[in-house]
Image: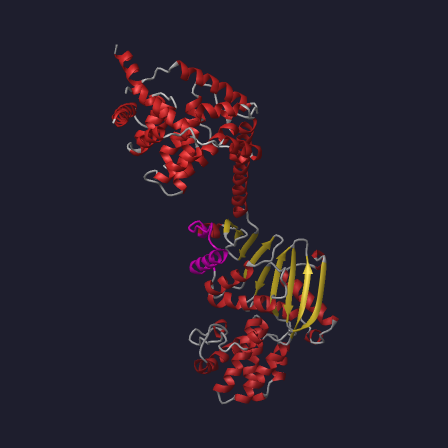
Amino acid sequence: MNRRETEEKLKKACYHAAPDVLKGVKERLENASDEDAIVPMNLKQRRRTRYSVFVPAVLSGAAAFLLVCNVALLIAGKNNESKAVRTVALELNPGVELGVNSDGRVVNVKTLDKTSEEMISKMDLNGTDADVAVNAILGAMYQSGSLGDNQESIATVEVTQGTEPAVQQDGDEAMGSGYDDKAQSGTEAASNKDSDDKPVAVSENRADENPSVSSNAAEKLDMSTLKKHDEAGADTAYHIALKDAGISADQVTEHHSSWQLEEEDPEFDDVPTPKTEAKASEGSEEKATEATATPSAKASAEATATTSVKTTAEATTTPSVKASAEATATPSVKATAEATTTTSVKATTEATATTSVKATTEATATPSVKAATKASEGTKKAAEGFYLVTFKTARYTYIYMIGEDGEILSVSRSVI
Amino acid sequence: MLFLLMTAETGDELSDDLKERNKILDKDLRKLARGKSQALDEVYELTKGAVYGFILSILKNEEDSEDVMQDTYLKVCLNADQYRTQGKPMAWIMTIARNLALMKLRSQKRYADIPDYEWDAIADDNAEFGSEDRMVLKAALTNLNSEESQIVLLHAVSGLKHREIAEMLDMPLATVLSKYNRSIKKLQKMFEA
C-alpha cells in the first residue's frame, strides 16, 4: 500500500463517517442572527464595511471629546483654586491683605506699606491656610514690634463675594493665638458683639483704652442724654461714632441708631477664669485688665493693681464719668468702683466684662465682699445694654456699639 | 533540483481534483455571501468528511464533533461575506472548524480516546461507514497523537498544503513534514497488517 492509497482510504473513511448535519444547519440558519458572527480568519484582509469604518471613527471622536472636556475641567479647576474669593486684610501698621480661595487657602499676599513688605518678603504664605497665615503674620508683627502692648487696634478686613465669611472666625482664632492678650480680647468682642452681623466683613475692636478717643468722646458725651436710652441718646451715640470714625455727617449716606438690650450670653457669663491677672510689678493699667490667673493669685494682685489703675483713671477721666461710678458704689468701696468704672469707660467691652467678673472673684477672696459685689453689680448693670449705631459711607458700613456711659464697646467696619 | 525535491517531498503540488474543488468552493462561498443558501449543499458535500474528521481528531467525541460541525457550517454561511478569494477556501473553512473545536474543548473535559460505543454510534448513523472505514479512522485517531492525526487529516483529507498546515497549527514546516511522513508510514504498516 503506497502513500496515496493510504491517504485515499483515510479520506474515504472520514467522508463515510461524517454525519448529516446539513438539515440542522439550514434550520439554524433561518433563525440565525448577527450574534453568531465570528472573528474572520485573516484580520489583515478584513473587509472594511460601513460599520467597521464608522464605529471606530465615532469612538475616536468621543474619546477625543472626553479628553478635551477633561482637560478643560482640569484647567477650570486650577483656575478656581487660584482664584481669590475672599480678602483678609490686617489693617495695622504694617497692613497686609491676603487673597483667600474657596478652600480657605491663601492665593496671594499684598503688602500695603514698606514695613509689611519687608516682613512678608521673608514668608511664603501662598497655599497655606488663611488662619495659619494670619497667625504667622501676627506673630511676625509681634516679634518685629509692630504689635505691642501699647498697640491700640487691630483691623481684620474680610471681603466676601457672595458667600458667608467663614474665614472670619478662623482669622479671629488665629488672632487670639498669635497675638495673645490683646488680640484675644478683640476676638471676644468680635465673637460676642458681632455675631449677629454676618455681613460684617471688617471687625475693628478696641481691646485697649484709647485715651485720646475716649477723652474726646467723653467731652462730647452728654451723660444725661445718653442714659435716656431714647432718640436723643441714640443721636448722641451716633455723633460719638462719627467722631471716632473721623467722618463728617455729610459723608454718611445712611444711618441708624437705637438702644439695644444686650442678650444674655451664658458662654460669656460662665467664663470661670477671666483674663484679669494683675501684673502689678509692671504697674500699668493695661496689664491689669489682661491675661489670666487663678482667683487666689488674682485677689491679692488685684488689690495693688486696682490702686494703680484708680490713680491713672482718675487723672484721665472726666468728673461726670467718675461721679456716675461713685453713685453706684457705697463709700467704702468707692475707690474700687471708680477704678473699675473708669477702666470700662476707656477700654473695650471685654475690659468691662472682665472687670465685672474680677469683682465677683474678689468678693470671694477679699474681706470687702459686699462692697466689691456692689461695684460689680453696678458695672454689670451698665453692660446690660448699648447703643447700636450703624451708618454707611460710600465705601464702608460702620457698626458701633456704644455703652450708655459713652464708651465705645466695639467697632465694625465692612467694605460695601 | 533541491527545490523540486522539496516540492515533491512536501506534496505541495495540488492535484487537479483539489484545484477543481477549490474553484467550486470559491464560487459557492461567493454565492453564500450574496445570500444564496443553496450553495451550502455543495460546500457541505465537498468538505463534510474533512471537517468532521478534523474536528473528531481534536475533540475525540462523536457527539461534540457533530455539534461543532453544525456550528462550523453555520458560521461559514453567516461569514461568507468575509471570505476573500485567495484560492484557499478549504483553509478558511478548516480554520473556522478548528477555532470552534478548540472553544468546545476548553469548555468541557478532554477525551483521551474515542470509546467503542461511539464508533458504534457513528456506524449506526451512517450506513456507508463500514468496518474498513472504522478500522482506518480508528487507527488514525487512536494510534497517532492529536498533532499527528490533525496533520494527516488536514493534508490527506482536506488537501491543505503543508505550509498552510504549519501556519494554521503554528508549527515549523519541517516539523509538519516530519510528523506527516512518520504518521503516514505508521498508518501504512497498520493498514498492511
Which picture quadrant has residue A9?
top left
Q: Position of residue A368 (x, y in %)?
A: 52, 89
**Total of numbered circles in the picture?**
0
The boundaries of the magenta stretch are: A119-146
> Would residue A187 be found to the left or right of residue A323 on screen?
left
Which residue is painted at 38% across and 21% down in the image?
A: B159
Q: Determine if residue A134 is in view.
A: yes
For the C terminus of chain A, the quadrant is: bottom right
> Would residue A361 be found to the left or right of residue A232 on screen?
left
Residue A373 vs residue A168, the one in the foreground: A168
Q: Is residue A121 magenta?
A: yes
Q: Position of residue A53 (x, y in %)?
A: 54, 27
Above or below for B10 versus B52 = above
Which residue is painted at 58% across and 61% down in the image?
A: A203
Residue A385 vs residue A91, the one in the foreground: A385
> Would residue A206 be found to the left or right of residue A128 on screen?
right
Q: Residue furthest top?
A: B1
